[in-house]
Amino acid sequence: MTKKEIVKQISERIGLTQLKTKEIVQQTFDAIVDTLIEVGRIELRNFGVFEVKMRKARKARNPRTGERVDVEPKKVVTFKPGKEMEERVRKFAHIPGPEEKAETVVLGGDDVDGEAEAMAAAKNFNRPRKTPSSPA
């Protein structure tokens, strides 16, 4: 799923143009990134928590040469899913088997202006929920 597909689904759901919806989605992503830069943490209820953490310096190995190298400490963004998201994904997510090819999700990869987003997207965003009483 790409950002373009997310925009299309949302615009169809709420009846806005794709152009206006794309602007709203982009502003949302930008607000998340700006908050991470300024505050270092953003909590989205029932979704999850994005947090900037410091990864310690460590020793690693160059895979080509086998030479040991020092890796500098660096800031990384972590995500901890909220309870509701975890429960829904655990209950409804389809995990590809060995014979199936896993789908890669690239947000912003379809933009002509080359913007990159740092946000996870739920795969079955527009699919109806399955309930225990409904056929599979």
Image (tube, rainbow, N blue to C red):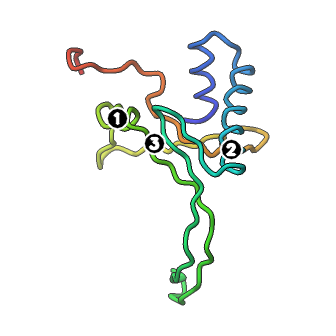
In this rendering, which labeled residue sits more in front, label 1 or label 2? 2
N-term mark: 3 or 2 = 2
Q: Which mark is residue 103?
A: 3
Which of the two residues, 18 or 44, is positioned nearer the viewer here?
44
Badge count:
3
Tell me the amino acid under the disc marked 3: Glu
Residue drawn at point x = 65 percent, y = 40 percent: 32
Residue 3: percent from the left, percent from the top? 62, 34
Residue drawn at point x = 24 percent, y = 15 percent: 134
Asked which secondary structure carries label 2, the reply is: helix
- Where 11 sits versus 102, above or below? above
Quarter of the figure with residue 26: top right
Residue 108: percent from the left, percent from the top? 66, 40
Asked which secondary structure carries label 3, the reply is: loop
Return the residue at label 1: 93
In this rendering, which labeled residue sits more in front, label 3 or label 2? 2
In this rendering, which labeled residue sits more in front, label 1 or label 3? 1
Tell me the amino acid under the disc marked 1: Ala
Q: Which mark is residue 35?
A: 2
Residue drawn at point x = 72 percent, y = 32 percent: 27
Quarter of the figure with residue 24: top right
